[in-house]
Image (cartoon, grey):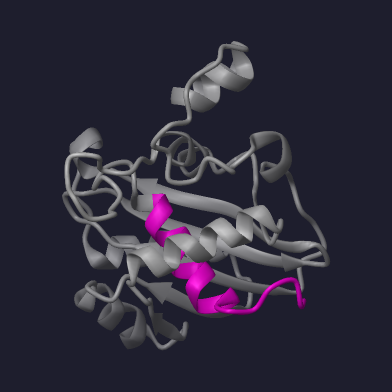
Amino acid sequence: CRYKSLYSGAFYQRFIEGKWVAADGLVYPMFDAAKHVRQGSDFDMYYMSCDYGTVNPFSLGLWGHAADGWYRISEYYHSSRDRGIQLTDEEYYQQLCELADGRDIVAVIVDPSAASFIETIRRHGKYTVIKADNDVLTGINRVCRALKSNEIFISPSCTDAIREFSIYRWDNDIRRDAPKKENDHAMDDIRYFVQAVLGDKQNDY
């Protein structure tokens, strides 16, 4: 089954195998593949969002605006730990250009701690960079609103984002509200996009 190779974790068990898997502890329990995973078309505006990593995974998403909301059209996800290959900022920049594929990108929203990668993008002079807002809880709350009000959708090809939505959990071992620092790289770049582009706006496109 091709879905088995695409999806894993709670998503695969709940929606492909038909098993009930507890959503307790999920950061985004309102994420529903039947509703949020779909293909968009007729995009009139594009952004990109990036969570930077060298040893940790690097996650990059391409977003397009359609009449019914914003779509994560495609993504690039690289884990140097899993693949055994560490890429340079220039190599990541080339992946960014390939993902953009000649589209007119309004801006690339980047992890604010990724100073070297931000400088690499700016030096090439092709794309505008916005440093992301990294207020985690505010960003998570805004992504929750975006999912509940159907402001954002994920294309089926974005398998790493879909996988992380199904396993991104709160850390119950610490006293303050915080998600676990794992399976969160696409989640971070999605949060950066939602905070920067949607902000406090809701259903006004």
Find residue 75 and report its horizontal and vertical position in percent.
50, 51
Q: Residue at x 30, y 79 (%)?
A: 118
Q: Residue at x 63, y 72 (%)?
A: 46
Q: Nearer the viewer, residue 25 or 60?
A: 25
Q: Is residue 44 above or below residue 24?
A: below
In this picture, residue 93 sits left or right of residue 84: right
Q: Quadrant of the N terminus?
A: top right
Query: Is 204 covered by the magenta stretch?
Result: yes
In this picture, residue 175 sits left or right of residue 109: left
Q: Residue at x 53, y 21 (%)?
A: 12
Residue extending furthest toward the front: 175
Q: Main secondary structure of the magenta part?
A: helix
Find residue 73 and report its horizontal and vertical position in percent.
63, 54
Find residue 48 and report its horizontal and vertical position in percent.
51, 68
Find residue 181 and report its horizontal and vertical position in percent.
24, 48
Bounds of the magenta segment: 186-205
Q: Residue at x 38, y 58 (%)?
A: 188
Residue 99, can we see it? no
